Amino acid sequence: MTSGIRRTGIEKTMKVVLLISALASVLIVVLIFLFTMKEAMPAFREIGVWKLLSGTTWRPGNGEFGILAMIAGSGLVTLGAVVIGVPLALCTAVFLSEIAPEWIVRIVRPSIELLAGIPSVVYGLFGMVVIVPLIRTIPAPGNAGYGLLSASIVLAVMVLPTIANISEFAIRSVPRGYREGSLALGATKWETISRVMIPAARPGIISAVVLGLGRALGETIAMIMVIGNSVVLPTAITGNPLSIFLSRARTLTGNIAVEISYATGVHESALFATGVVLFVLIMLVNSSARFLLNKGAH
Amino acid sequence: MKKNIIRIIALAVLILPGACGQPETGEQGAGATGSETVEISVVGSTTVQPLAELFSEAYEAINPSILVTVSGGGSSVGVKSAAEQTADIGMASREIKDSEIQDCPEIVVHTIARDGIAIVTNPDLDVDGITMEQARGIFAGEITDWSEVGGVAGMITVASREEGSGTRSAFEDLVMSDALVSELAILQPSNGAIRTTVASTPGCIAFISFGYLDNSTKPMAIDGALPTAENVSTGSYPVVRPLNMVTYGEPTGAVAEWLEFILGEDGQAIVVAEGYLPF
């Protein structure tokens, strides 16, 4: 009897503890957003939301605050990372879940997990001394190696573990019957993977990519080290439109990190406004993923 | 650890009366009486901050009854804090602007050290010196090839500190006059990162504080003068900024004693050891 009372007591307490823990993260998100918003209000009022978002000149010394160049920088570097990183991560996931023998999996998977544990400043350093000199050898006027391409490559490697791990898990979670059925109907292994396994794992793969996107948008220090940080709207530097990736840029996160220690007044507030924009962007990415997931489920 | 705790408590004691609307902080440093602990608050430039921290550590070893709390915020914040008496001392890594003196004629500037700003390039470059005019052209993005300043043809890559950096604003004042640093410059947020960028990028040029000069980059002569302490003392090297401490009125009591220590032999030895130039 006493043990029964104690057990229901524990049950109730644990329920409350778990509820509080779950609510804590909601509360923290709301608090961070409200605080950032409050600090950003003076900038929105004094500069104007549209002028802030559409301005291409960022010269705090002259009172010019436009973050369009940073929005473009963050967008393009994330796009670059996705283009390079997603195929790589997806192929890794398919290989690990469908093709690789057990002993290879036992070597490759811990390596990928190790990749996730490397501090981003180390990636930045690696990018600075290895990737940047490599990119510099591309002959184009004004190309010094620092820029979107170097940053995209570094970022692709950084999001690889996130995307590869979750995608692999998603593919492994596809019921065995799907694969066996496909093979039994005479489909080859490749047909089974590309027509059955990947489509069946699509919701998981999409969430993997979106988590990777979120990580890419938020990455700061490694980007600062390789992207050049110049506040310019990225433009193609030769006739080839792809050379836009050789252009230098600044990310939204980098803008905050580079300048916050000096900023006062409107400048500081404008940096918080940069944070709000970043916040909204990430919310958009996450909710579009949710939308895609729901659509996929029906 | 223990010292930190004492500092935090001291800081809290300092802040509390202020919160009740009694701006007494300016008076705090005034009466250095024997056994009682006296608090000096120092606020401002992040360039001067590490020096100030070393001064305070060294001075507390000699005179444990004085606690110096150092915090950053930038040169402008430093001057403003001193003028408004929210801090005993403001730090600034540049000249005090005329407008700042106009706003508060009572402030007194104490130059505690000087810091040269050197123009450095990648060590493989074959250009040894440029003129002030050429430096302006290069950093403004008007001169884009080394052949224009007497070197072998090759692209000039400009690297710079970010907007808001004291080193950058001092460089703009001393070298750029009205021109602006090119928007295409690679921006790095610290002297160290600038140095790595210059060392690893062929044809790269940037400016760094004297304290960061080493073999990985090549110092450029400006108008024939190399960035050395000697050339600064003879006045032939032009790009030098003062590191200042600002007080409201002539300092008295503990604040005066602390400034005396900084300007004395021991303080200036720290200045030299950290790679800066004595005042």
Image: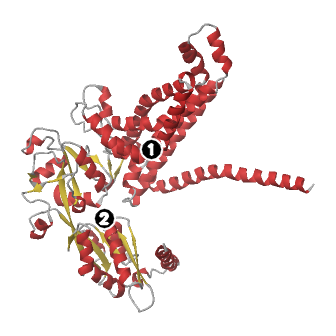
Q: Residue furthest right?
A: A1
Say which amino acid is labelled 1. Glu
Instruction: Looking at the picture, tell me which residue is in the foreground, A78 or A288.
Output: A78
Quarter of the image where one finds residue A105: top right
Q: Residue furthest bottom?
A: B34
Q: Residues within 10 Å of mark 1 (few under 14, many from 20)?
A: many
Which quarter of the figure is the C terminus of chain A placed in? Answer: top right
Vertical order, B147 against B71 (above or below): above
Say which amino acid is labelled 2. Thr
Using the image, name the chain to which the residue with label 2 belongs.
B
Residue at screen point 29% across, 55% down: B192
| Residue annotated with mark 2 | B47
Residue at screen point 36% across, 72% down: B53
The secondary element bearing badge 2 is classed as loop
Residue B235: x percent and y percent? Answer: 10, 68
The secondary element bearing badge 1 is classed as loop
- The image's colour scheme reads secondary structure
Residue at screen point 33% across, 67% down: B50
Which quarter of the figure is the N terminus of chain A placed in? Answer: bottom right
Vertical order, B260 against B137 (above or below): below
| Residue annotated with mark 1 | A219
Direction from residue A203 to residue A266 in the image, left or right? left
Instruction: Looking at the picture, tell me which residue is in the foreground, A101 or A279.
Output: A101
Quarter of the image where one finds residue B170: bottom left
Direction from residue B64 to residue B210 in the image, left or right? left
Vertical order, B197 against A203 (above or below): below
Residue A234: x percent and y percent? Answer: 32, 36
